[in-house]
Amino acid sequence: MPKFAANLTTMFTEYPFLERFKAAAQAGFRAVEFLSPFEYPASVLKQELDNHGLQLVLFNTTVGNTAKGEWGLNALPGRESDARANIDLALEYALALNCQTIHVMAGVVPEGQQQYLYEQVQVDNVRYAADKYAPHNISIVLEALSDVVKPNYLYASQYHTLKLVKRINRPNVSVQIDLFHAQIVDGNLTHLLQNLNGHFGHIQVASVPDRHEPDDGEVNFTYLFNLLDQLGYSGWIGCEYIPKNTTKAGLNWIKPYL
Ligand SMILES: O=C(O)C(=O)[C@@H](O)CO
Ligand SMILES: [Mg+2]
């Protein structure tokens, strides 16, 4: 049976961020994920999680300065000390929030720059993070982002991400498959999940092409949820979608699973 986490960055946006925990719990979720915890003291977030009986299953390292086009610092040559300070900060938050998985963001490769230099910096920084997180049983996931959402992100294909995961070569580093991006970039999702089985540690879902509830569009998610079960995937599936109408009105698809 698949286990779903509400993504509080994209769902329940009818409410201010701190009120989304209660809304998710009232809708039946027992787990949540979100993009960034760093805007709040960890104690404030912990209180919300505890008050509503929720488990935090994923957050990301910092995106950096989005006004300057940054979307992650860990692949940026010359930014290693900022990246590692953020990796350390993410560990503090993960320990305080009892979160076992962190998405270590890579970054955007500006036009004309050498991809291989950015890949090497990402490999080095993820190895630093992996070795630092391992004694705390904290895992790292790396997520490919399609050009539709983030042009020139270090990796768009799941297979490219897998190659880097293998190069990083740490037992606590795996792929995060966001099936929205995966359908746009790689397609052939059944074979993708079969080929990457054992190498992914987190899944996210949204319909394609509109990034709404996973009960519409070109992908048959019921089939994929069954396939994930058959493959023995026991991790979380994050609902990283933008509700078509209100969040609550769009939750019929999840009722059989909650
Ligand atoms: O955009 C996505 O997809 C994400 O999962 C974000 O958390 C990172 O860009
Ligand atoms: Mg995603």
Image (cartoon, rainbow, N blue to C red):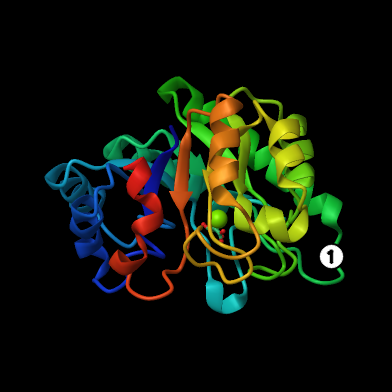
Q: Quadrant of the N terminus?
A: top left
Task: Give the secondary structure at mark 1.
Answer: loop
Image quarter of residue 227: top right
How many numbered tags mark residues here?
1
Q: Residue 198's spot in the image, x, y percent?
A: 64, 25
Q: Is residue 243 above or below residue 191?
A: below
In the rendered image, residue 192, in percent from the top left (x then y), is placed at 74, 40
Quarter of the view holding residue 50: top left
Q: Outermost residue toward the bottom?
A: 67
Quadrant of the picture in which ligand 1 is shown: bottom right
Q: In what quadrant of the picture does the C terminus appear?
A: top left
Residue under label 1: 113
Q: Nearer the viewer, residue 54 or 183?
A: 183
Amino acid type at image mark 1: Gln
Task: Using the image, determine if residue 107 lies above or below residue 5.
Answer: below
Instruction: Using residue 69 as the reference point, say whether residue 93 is left or right of it.
Output: left
Q: Is residue 96 left or right of residue 101?
A: left
**Residue at 40%, 44% in the rendered image:** 4
**Image position of 24 with respect to 135: above or below:** below
| Closer to the camera in the image, 139 or 192 | 192
Instruction: State the image coordinates of residue 160 (x, y, percent, origin top left).
Output: 79, 45
Sort mark 1 into few (<14), some (14-19) or many (20+) by Cα contacts within 10 Å: few
